[in-house]
Image (spheres, helix red, strand yellow):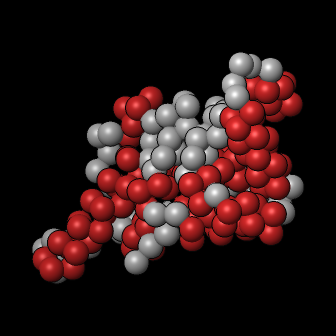
């Protein structure tokens, strides 16, 4: 059962006096879901939802917090990608390092332009790139896909990486799930919670 199904089935708790077994099953699902949500949040957000006992309420609170902000809490890039890439290429790194940054630039560009074939081919040649922190971005290729709102690529990447890798955080401490939730993209959040 995927996490999104757990959230949906965790939303209405049965009364313990009506059915103890059903209540215990609900409580177990709720606890698992809440744990997954909390482990996907950065410390600054975790402090807001840490005392909530319902997974459904925690998700509603997160959605409300970030929907009301009208996008002001979205991650802000301080420099454009080209200037960051050029800074990386002008450093004293050896040529192999420069080629790797150039390769990652091509991967990120493919993801941002929704070219799954190029991204997939790159990831087949460099499997570690699916979970590597990309030098000139804040996080992984999954973070880049979520930030670019490329749902199809997010879905493909989720199928390629482990659940543990889904919890990887970017430089600011945010998981891809957190970025999807703050952008208001429920479908991407669903992919990331399966």
Nearer to me, 52 or 37: 37
**Residue 65, picture quadrant:** top right
Q: Viewed as shown, does residue 4 lie left or right of 176?
A: left
Q: Viewed as shown, does residue 160 lie left or right of 167?
A: right
Q: Viewed as shown, does residue 8 lie left or right of 131?
A: left
Quadrant for the N terminus, please: bottom left
Numbered marks: total: 0
Nearer to me, 130 or 17: 130
Task: Answer yes or no: is residue 25 visible.
Answer: yes
Task: Answer yes or no: is residue 178 visible.
Answer: no
Question: Which residue is pictured at 36% across the width and 68% down the height?
Answer: 10
- In this view, 18 is above or below 47: below
Nearer to me, 193 or 70: 193
Residue 88 in the image, given as x and y percentages of width and height = 75, 26
**Residue 28, picture quadrant:** bottom left
Question: Which residue is pictured at 73% across the width and 60% down the height?
Answer: 122
Question: Which residue is pictured at 23% across the width and 66% down the height?
Answer: 27
Residue 98 in the image, given as x and y percentages of width and height = 75, 34
Q: Viewed as shown, does residue 96 lie left or right of 29?
A: right
**Residue 95, picture quadrant:** top right
- In this view, 162 is above or below 45: below
Question: Which residue is pictured at 39% across the width and 37% down the height?
Answer: 46
């Amino acid at each position: 059962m995927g996490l999104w199904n757990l959230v949906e089935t965790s939303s209405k708790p049965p009364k313990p006096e009506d059915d103890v077994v059903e209540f215990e099953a609900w409580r177990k699902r709720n606890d698992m879901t809440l744990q997954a949500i909390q482990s996907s949040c950065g410390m600054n957000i975790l402090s807001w939802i840490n005392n909530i006992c319902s997974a459904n309420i925690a998700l509603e609170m997160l959605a409300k917090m970030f929907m009301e902000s009208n996008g002001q809490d979205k991650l802000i890039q301080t420099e454009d990608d080209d200037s960051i890439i050029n800074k990386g290429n002008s450093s004293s790194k050896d040529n192999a390092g420069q080629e790797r940054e150039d390769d990652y630039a091509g991967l990120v560009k493919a993801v941002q332009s929704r070219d799954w074939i190029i991204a997939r081919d790159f990831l087949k040649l460099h499997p570690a790139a699916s979970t590597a922190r990309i030098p000139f971005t804040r996080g992984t290729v999954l973070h880049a896909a979520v930030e670019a709102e490329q749902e199809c690529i997010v879905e493909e990447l989720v199928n390629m990486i482990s659940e543990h890798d889904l919890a990887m955080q970017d430089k600011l401490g945010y998981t891809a799930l957190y970025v999807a939730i703050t952008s208001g993209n429920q479908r991407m959040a669903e992919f990331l919670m399966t």
